[in-house]
Image (cartoon, helix red, strand yellow):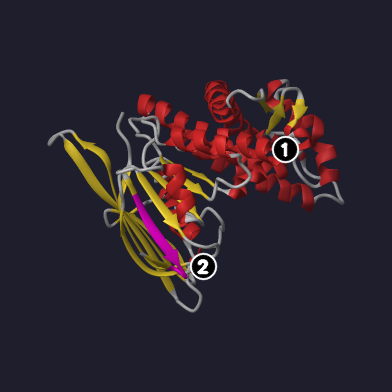
């Protein structure tokens, strides 16, 4: 199976990295350094080139080095087949950020008409300590997990999601506007009729995704935990037992009192359990970390299989940011063995301890190790 490879990365004024020019191994790349030195910022720069945004903030200006006016991230990738020449065709993705100006995002020096047209070109999965939010935070984090996976394979899904969210924002604004007085039903009806079609597509796509994804998750969790526990992951949606158009009509008055829309796929969730018990209540730190890691590694395997079959995509790039905390040595060893297998593509890992990294990776001729200190990468 083919894969997408980031060959080189150039960074100027991105977060605390003032300048870096890096060449990568096609398999394993490691960044070592103390906390706060810039390791995660390198991974975020790679993430930026896949999703046209940072993994950690929606405000582009916050990614520019303090005191500077602009930033640039550029990567050279290889993974597309040139059918005429029968060779691998390299391409360049660049992102320019300037304070007070719309970001510039290009493929081979050509601007994208819409940034969402780029999503899915470079499949990528990032695993970091912030993934704990999947358990600790509200349902929006778990919906985002589904959205990130499906959007990399299904352009229509991303279009429907964008359209639905825009219409939802308009409906909520109307509900608040008319909270103290009668709201004209025809105004809400127009929005609701437009919302139903994208909402139903989102629901069907999530249902299809979850049915296909669950076996990957179960298998990955078993590999990491050596089948020590039985995980359960279930997709929950209001659309499983009701017609959305009718639900909008029935709940209008209540929604006017609430000031927001109570029905629709924006209320979907994932139920996470160990056996029959809620993971958040009964899972230890190690069990919760294992659960989330299994979800994200399964995401990479799912993208690899489904993308290759349906879209001609390759194994996604895998970013592992400080993932070995709160896991026993046996689980760490199984994770490392798993991601270095042929099932996974190019990998980028961060850790604070080079000796620890060397011990768990063992001798590996395909590994390249970088040292990061105060934004400087050697």
**Label 1 secondary element:** loop
Query: How far across and down, in percent of the image, does residue 249 sit?
Result: 77, 31
Residues at marks 1 and 2, CA–CA distance in whole angstroms: 38 Å
Answer whether residue 156 is visible to the viewer in this image. yes
Q: Please tell me the numbered disc located at residue 61.
A: 2
Q: Is residue 293 above or below residue 60?
A: above
The mark lying in front, picked from 1 and 2, is: 1
- Which of 334/231 is in front? 334
Q: Which residues are magenta?
A: 368-375
Q: Please tell me the numbered disc located at residue 284.
A: 1
Residue under the image location 55 percent in, 62 percent down: 35
Answer whether residue 153 is visible to the viewer in this image. no
Quadrant, the N terminus: top left
**Tag 2: Cα neighbours inside 10 Å, few (<14), some, or many (≥20)?**
many
Are circles 1 and 2 on residues that touch, CB within 8 Å? Answer: no
Pick whichever of labels 1 and 2 is earlier in the sequence: 2
Query: How far across and down, in percent of the image, does residue 109 sit?
Result: 27, 57
Residue under the image location 81 percent in, 33 percent down: 251
């Amino acid at each position: 199976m083919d894969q997408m490879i980031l060959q080189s990365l150039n960074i100027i004024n991105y977060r605390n990295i003032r300048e870096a020019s890096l060449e990568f191994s096609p398999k394993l790349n490691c960044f070592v350094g103390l906390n706060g030195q810039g390791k995660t910022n390198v991974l975020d720069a790679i993430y930026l080139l896949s999703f046209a945004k940072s993994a950690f903030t929606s405000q582009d200006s916050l990614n520019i080095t303090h005191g500077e006016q602009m930033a640039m991230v550029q990567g050279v990738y290889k993974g597309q087949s040139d059918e005429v020449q029968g060779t691998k065709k390299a391409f360049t993705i660049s992102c320019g950020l300037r304070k007070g100006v719309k970001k510039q995002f290009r493929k081979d020096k050509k601007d994208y008409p819409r940034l969402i047209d780029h999503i899915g070109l470079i499949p990528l999965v990032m695993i970091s300590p912030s993934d704990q939010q999947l358990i600790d935070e509200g349902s929006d984090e778990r919906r985002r997990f589904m959205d990130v996976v499906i959007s990399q394979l299904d352009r229509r899904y991303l279009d429907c999601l964008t359209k639905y969210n825009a219409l939802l924002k308009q409906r909520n604004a109307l509900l608040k506007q008319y909270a103290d007085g009668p709201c004209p039903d025809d105004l809400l009806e127009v929005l609701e009729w437009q919302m139903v079609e994208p909402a139903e597509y989102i629901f069907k796509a999530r249902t299809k995704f979850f049915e296909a994804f669950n076996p990957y998750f179960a298998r990955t969790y078993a590999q990491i935990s050596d089948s020590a526990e039985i995980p359960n992951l279930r997709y929950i949606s209001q659309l499983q037992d009701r017609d959305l158009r009718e639900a909008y009509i029935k709940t209008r008055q209540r929604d006017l009192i609430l000031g927001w829309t109570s029905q629709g796929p924006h209320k979907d969730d994932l139920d996470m359990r160990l056996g029959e018990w809620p993971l958040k209540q009964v899972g230890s730190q190690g069990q919760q970390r294992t659960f989330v890691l299994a979800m994200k590694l399964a995401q990479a395997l799912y993208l690899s299989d489904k993308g290759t079959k349906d879209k001609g995509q390759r194994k996604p790039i895998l970013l592992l940011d400080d993932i070995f905390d709160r896991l026993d040595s046996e689980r760490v060893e199984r994770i490392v063995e798993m991601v270095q297998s042929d099932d996974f593509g190019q990998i980028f890992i961060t850790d604070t301890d080079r000796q620890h990294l060397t011990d768990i990776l063992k001798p590996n001729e395909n590994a390249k190790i970088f040292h990061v200190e105060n934004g400087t990468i050697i």
